[in-house]
Image (cartoon, helix red, strand yellow):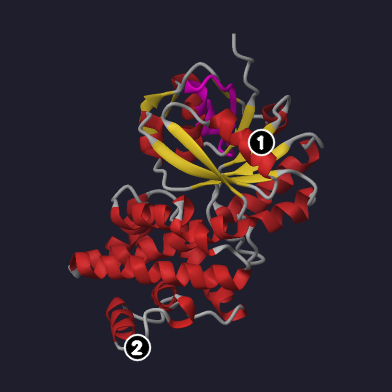
Amino acid sequence: MPDEKQHVAILGAGSWGTALAIAFAHNDIPVNLWGRDLAALEDISVKRINERYLPQHTLPDLVRIVPNLQQAMENTPNVLLVVPSHGFRSTLKMLKPFWHEEQRLLWATKGIDPDSHQLLHQVADEILGSTVKKAIISGPSFAKEVAKGLPTAVAVASSHDDFAQEIAREFSSEVLRMYTNQDIIGVQIGGAVKNVLAIATGVSDALGYGANARSALITRGLAEMIRLGHAMGAQAETFVGLTGLGDLVLTCTDDLSRNRRFGFALGKMKTMDDAQQEIGQVVEGIKTAEQLYTLMQQYQVEMPICEQIYYILAGELTVEQAVANLLHRSLKSEYTRGI
């Protein structure tokens, strides 16, 4: 018989955390699922369904709902955070008193810390220490499709390649394939920037600009992603992989993307509040646009699409003004500075 697989604690019971819990359990991995909303956890525990986020999917028996954070982390070598980026720091602070030195930290959160404008691995180093093994799970993956067991490929990135390989072997299944990557900076930048670009393509599609404009936004948005990545020390090849181009295309072209749907609502001239209420879940690109605006100034990087989305969200420009600004920029070589 194969060796019994180790428990994993998944902290965050939203759509993505629940989907990963389902996927891991179907792969015979026992899961402790924890979330901040105790009433929601109780409802999930009783009904064995996350009615708010994944109402069509019953939780397998190997998924154990654990409302106590300390108990959720007991006897779990791997702790996986699946919380919004603005809750990443606070969740780490909550779990720190229960952390054991032999545990390893993973996260499937995409975004930038709103307090410090740091990438999330820097936040984890600050709170848990740089010696803790850390890995990021990222790539083109909608929660609903993963929960259904549809074929999906993602990357697990870590500066400890042996750890990344171990996680890839442990978590991969017949339908979930994990590639390894050592570029933790590039993987995080790709996962953050693509959400802002998805808002841009949603706006464009709502305005009826068509496939040509959408393709241009994706391609030039990729150039912006690479430009920032280069300035921050990432590897260029990361951005043409799963966590760069792969996730970018997925998020910009399919209506399962919350960020794209949010942008579409803005393009239909809905207010930000109405658009967010319509989505009903966290739209990561809103906060990320602000963080990217700070980073593009800090690193003196041109990111015109992301910049215009920031101005729209900050209420400084209308959608029409932002479009005009992009179309009337001075002409230049497509490959200026290599991108």
Q: At which x and y percent is residue 166?
A: 64, 33
Q: At which x and y percent is residue 244?
A: 46, 57
Instruction: Report the front residue among 113 and 68.
Output: 113
Residue at 60% over, 78% down = 299
Q: At which x and y percent is residue 6?
A: 65, 23
Q: Could you tell whether 301 is left or right of 275 in the image?
A: right
Q: At which x and y percent is residue 171?
A: 55, 31
Asked if 106 appears above or below 89 in the picture, the reply is: above
Q: Could you tell whether 222 is left or right of 78 in the image?
A: left
Instruction: Report the front residue among 274 and 35.
Output: 35
* View extreme (bottom): residue: 330
Q: Which residues are magenta?
A: 24-42
Say what amino acid the circle numbered 2 marks. Arg
27 inside magenta stretch = yes
Q: Earlier in the sequence, mark 2 or mark 1?
A: 1
Q: Residues within 10 Å of mark 2 (few under 14, many from 20)?
A: few
Say what amino acid the circle numbered 1 marks. Val
Please state which of the two labelled residues, at mark 2 or mark 1, is closer to the viewer.
2
Decide if residue 238 is in sight here: yes
Residue at 53% over, 53% down = 110
Q: Residues within 10 Å of mark 1 (few under 14, many from 20)?
A: many
Instruction: Report the front residue among 62 and 152.
Output: 152
- Which quadrant of the rendered structure holds the N terminus? top right
| Structural distance between the alpha carbons of marks 2 and 1 | 46 Å
- Res. 79 mark: 1
Secondary structure of the residue carrying numbered label 1: strand
Decide if residue 267 is in sight here: no
Asked if 215 appears above or below 302 in the picture, the reply is: above
- Which quadrant of the rendered structure holds the C terminus? bottom left
Residue at 21% over, 68% down = 212
- Res. 329 mark: 2
61 inside magenta stretch = no
